Image (tube, rainbow, N blue to C red):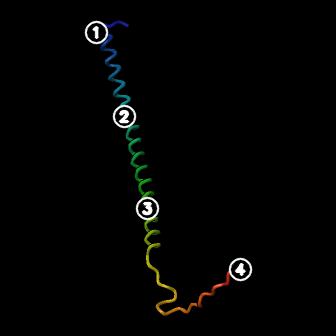
């Protein structure tokens, strides 16, 4: 290939045509990647938030004081028995 001004202009015109023709699909691909990233972050972020909320509810419910089934009345307990050693 010669480097005459005509051939250099032809290469420049080809590069410009390539940039104009391929810019839209390349930008579309980059936009799709960006939208996919946003969708993934939102999906997994929401899932993490749900799992965290469920875990927090489990901890709070487990630590909540529960009323005694016997209430405030005294409960009779048998005296302990001690067995003689054998």
In the rendered structure, which disc, 2 or 3, sits on the residue that comes first in sequence?
2
- Return the residue nearer the eye: 50 or 73: 73
Q: CA distance from mark 4 to mark 1?
A: 115 Å
Residue 86 against residue 7 in the figure, above or below? below
- Label 2, on which residue? 24
Spot the residue most to the left.
Answer: 5
Neighbour tally class for label 2: few under 14, some 14-19, many 20 plus, Cα within 10 Å: few
Q: Position of residue 44 (x, y in %)?
A: 44, 53
Q: CA distance from mark 3 to mark 4?
A: 56 Å
Q: Given contact means CB atoms under 8 Å apart, are the residues at marks 4 and 1 in contact?
A: no
Neighbour tally class for label 3: few under 14, some 14-19, many 20 plus, Cα within 10 Å: few
In the rendered structure, which disc, 4 or 1, sits on the residue that comes first in sequence?
1
Quadrant, the C terminus: bottom right
Q: Given contact means CB atoms under 8 Å apart, are the residues at marks 2 and 1 in contact?
A: no
Name the secondary structure under disc 4.
loop
Look at discs 2 and 4 and give the one toward the viewer.
Answer: 4
- Return the residue nearer the eye: 60 or 37: 60
In the rendered structure, which disc, 3 or 4, sits on the residue that comes first in sequence?
3
- Label 1, on which residue? 5
Residue 22 against residue 4 in the figure, above or below? below
In the rendered structure, which disc, 2 or 4, sits on the residue that comes first in sequence?
2
Name the secondary structure under disc 2.
helix
In the rendered structure, which disc, 2 or 1, sits on the residue that comes first in sequence?
1
- Label 4, on which residue? 86
Spot the residue most to the right.
Answer: 86
Q: CA distance from mark 3 to mark 1?
A: 67 Å
In the rendered structure, which disc, 3 or 1, sits on the residue that comes first in sequence?
1
Q: CA distance from mark 2 to mark 4?
A: 94 Å
- Return the residue nearer the eye: 16 or 70: 70
Q: Given contact means CB atoms under 8 Å apart, are the residues at marks 2 and 4 in contact?
A: no
């Amino acid at each position: 290939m010669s480097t005459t001004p005509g051939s250099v202009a032809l290469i420049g015109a080809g590069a410009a045509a390539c940039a104009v023709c391929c810019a839209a699909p390349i930008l579309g691909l980059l936009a799709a990647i960006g939208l996919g990233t946003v969708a993934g972050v939102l999906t997994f972020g929401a899932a993490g938030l749900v799992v965290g909320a469920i875990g927090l509810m489990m901890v709070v419910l487990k630590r909540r004081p529960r009323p005694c089934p016997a209430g405030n009345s005294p409960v009779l307990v048998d005296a302990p028995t001690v067995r003689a050693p054998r």
